[in-house]
Amino acid sequence: MTVTGYLADFSLPELFQLLEQGNKTGLLTICPLAETIAVDRHNHHIWFSQGQIVAAGNSLDQQGLMRLIAQRGWMGDRAVSRLAQSCQVNTPLGLCLKNQGVLTAEQLKLLFYTQVMRQVCALFALPDGWFQFDPKAPLPVAEMTGLIATATDVTLAGLRALKDWAALDEKLPAPSSALVSVVEGKPNLRLNPNEWQVWEFTNGTMTLADVAQQLNLSVAKAQQIAFRLIVTGLAEEMPLMVTSPPSGLPAAEPDDLELSIAAGSAAGAAPISQSFLQNLVGFLKGKV
């Protein structure tokens, strides 16, 4: 089932995390809203295979990778098109050209960086946009280099490079919250020095405001680092001041808690469609 929504409700880092954890295959399309000025107005397409990103582009004509190769001056469009016809079915175009000696491994890495890392990382600055994930969309072998990147690696790269966090401000953990590790031992990800420092405080005993003071960081910087640890599946936010529900109200059921987690709701955030949440949670469980 196709799932749709808005990035103001469910951010791109959160989407990437869920698609990776769910090992989803399909096409994620992002349409910037009319007032968006952070990135260009094209629709953006990101293809996933088993939760990993395999290609990206701003069109569905299956010509994007060929255009990139031609722009680099490595081969003309027509020559690439002719060689592509000789590729085996379901073989990524980039890998096929490498096997034929047309492209080198380094050239493939450069193509993948330009096509995926540069394009996708720019989308993290998007204030809002409509998204759709279609699990039935076929993989575009003509757009694929044969290289892949985990959604986690792309998320880390994009958020580290992000200069304006306004689009994600409501998603950041509260300064009065603490972080709790959700992995055993130390993370396998390549964290930078500041991320490692914040990670050392993922024991749920110190607020982010205190962590920031301890590490001589701004509170906003500590929140941003904490958010990166959260959306890469390394930690969870834990409010240190927990209030009991008013008397007479029933305790939250597990399904209610799951919907709350999926919503990623924050105080003052706009309400999210319950039908959207139900579709999203059901989709991620593989039941729809």
Image: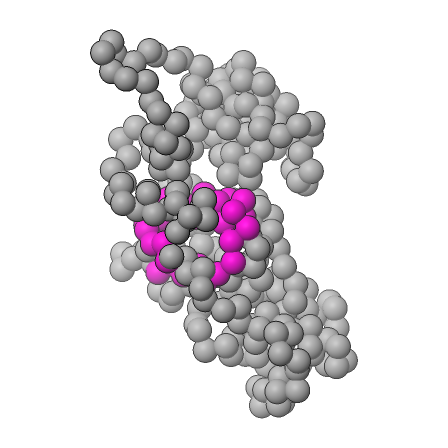
> In the image, is residue 127 above or below residue 46?
above
Q: Quick one: which residue is furthest to the top in this view?
A: 247
Percent of width and height locating residue 120: 50, 57
Q: Residue 93: name its quadrant.
A: bottom right
Percent of width and height locating residue 250: 28, 17
Q: Judge from the rendering whether residue 48 lies leftward or rightward of residue 276; answer left or right.
A: right
Q: How is the image coloured?
A: one colour
Q: Is residue 148 visible?
A: yes
> In the image, is residue 133 above or below residue 201?
below
Q: Residue 81: name its quadrant.
A: bottom right
At horizontal 68% and vertical 69% (from top left) the residue drawn is 108
Viewer-side residue, 135 vs 77: 135
Q: Is residue 119 visible?
A: no
> In the image, is residue 165 above or below residue 216?
below
Q: Which residues are magenta?
A: 2-31
Q: Is residue 25 within the magenta segment?
A: yes
How many numbered marks does the figure carry?
0
Q: Quick one: which residue is furthest to the front in this view?
A: 287
At horizontal 26% and vertical 31% (from top left) the residue drawn is 268
Q: Residue 8: name its quadrant.
A: top left
At horizontal 30% and vertical 46% (from top left) the residue drawn is 276
Percent of width and height locating residue 34: 27, 60
At horizontal 74% and vertical 68% (from top left) the residue drawn is 105
Percent of width and height locating residue 130: 32, 55
Q: Is residue 1 within the magenta segment?
A: no
Instruction: Give the quadrant of the N terminus.
Output: bottom left
Q: Quick one: which residue is furthest to the left in this view?
A: 248
